[in-house]
Amino acid sequence: MVTASKAHPKRYMRPPPQFVHDWFSPLRSSDVVPGKITNFSFMGHDLIAFRDEAGKAVVLDATCPHFGAHRGVGGRVVDGCVRCPFHGLHFDGTGQCVKGDFVKEARHLRHVKSTPWTVHEVASSIFIWHGPDRTRPDRPLRFAEPGFFDGWSEPVTNAGRRLAPTNVFFPTENIIDIQHFYAVHFWELRGIERQPAEDEDGAFTAIMHMTWTAGAQSPNPLLRKLGQMYSSPFHFDIRILGPGMAISVSTLTPEQGNLQLMNIILITPVNATDCQIRVVSSVRRTVDHPLNRLARRVLGVGLEDALSRVFLAIATKDFDGDEMIWTNRRFLQNPKPLPDDGPIIGYRKWCERFWPPDYMPDDDVVSASMPAPSLESSVLDPVAE
Ligand code: FES
Ligand SMILES: [Fe+2]
């Protein structure tokens, strides 16, 4: 939970905003069914999603620009348009009102329009740009680049879980919070190949060597004991693209077939207090067994498609311990970092680029005499000066 108090002189050390600027994925593709309206909340807005005649996902404000009815309550999809229940006006995929039940001249409707949100549908997910101008994203969505999933199984996802309450930055910060991997997940850190830091593409990245043990988080002592018989070393390559988006690629050992698993972790602010977290999983198509080739030819799916669902379930379950922390945590403006924590202060500084420019601007500082982050953090973290 983020608490308001006197602002820290360093902007990036102040309580971070919830409604940040970037791409987010509040919906799965399967949440938007042709012919139906989906109501949802995103960044404190009440929105509707539907599919136009071509099947393209469209996101509009729920509020009708005519006289303010909620178009998702009592409204319906007619010929790829949303029909508002109040006066029967129809809105197309561009948000333009194109006809009304009793409107004789279409030219009278020209000014009745609601600006659509910018949407990309990829990886079984619907992404929405949230920024100063909803029609003009400041940066591209990496997953939408052609060929991004070449060589990988069809990405799969599930409903995820609600984090109530949590700040949007808490989950991604965990990825570079090195000590938490053992304390929360019982993942053993065997080495760090690339220290967490900003890379040449502007992402915050790290490469670590970990060992995962089955059932280590289980409350059942018998399952924990049995789980010790199965542990798996893996190579963990992580890229945080934004507050609500991170990609991890885990590579298993040659004994485990050098399997490569991609998890895309998506965090979306629902409202001022809550977020949604969801994972998208995919497995690299490397299993070159005749049976797998046959399954792909006959069934259209291979072993990798089945494995991606298993890994998705494991990844989703792995948030059990995190959820308890995230939903009960307070944001400290003046934390007390330790040498092995990871560059958490540097990460906070990196995150500031996603803040709305008018959120806690520098001239808003209440007390410039507040202590800086503890001395240790300045020593350990080169950007925390
Ligand atoms: S309020 Fe929607 S048609 Fe009038
Ligand atoms: Fe975690």
Image (tube, helix red, strand yellow):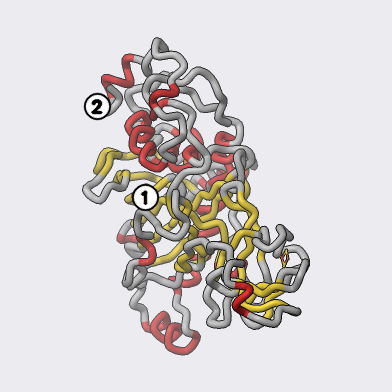
Instruction: Inspect the image, locate mark 2, and give the three-letter code of the amino acid beneath it.
Output: Pro
Give the x, y percent position of residue 113.
Answer: 58, 66
The picture places residue 349, in percent across and down from the top left corner, at 34, 33
Disc 2 secondary structure class: loop
Three-letter residue code for mark 1: Leu
Q: Secondary structure at mark 1?
A: strand
Residue 169 in the image: above or below residue 39: above
Q: Residue at x 49, y 37 (%)?
A: 170
Residue 182 appearing in the image: no
Task: Tell which residue pokes out farthest to the left in this image.
Answer: 200
- On residue 241, which mark appears? 1
Q: How many C-alpha atoms fall within 10 Å of the one at disc 2: few (<14), some, or many (≥20)?
A: few
According to the picture, the residue beneath numbered tag 2 turns out to be 382
Residue 292, given in percent of the width and then of the height, sits at 41, 80
**Which one is in front, 361 or 294?**
361
Quadrant of the image for the N terminus?
top right
Hey, which quadrant is residue 282 in on the image? bottom left
Residue depicted at x 70% and y 77%: 100
- Mark 1 CB lies closer than 8 A to ligand 2: no
Q: Where is residue 27 shown, x and y percent of the image?
A: 57, 61
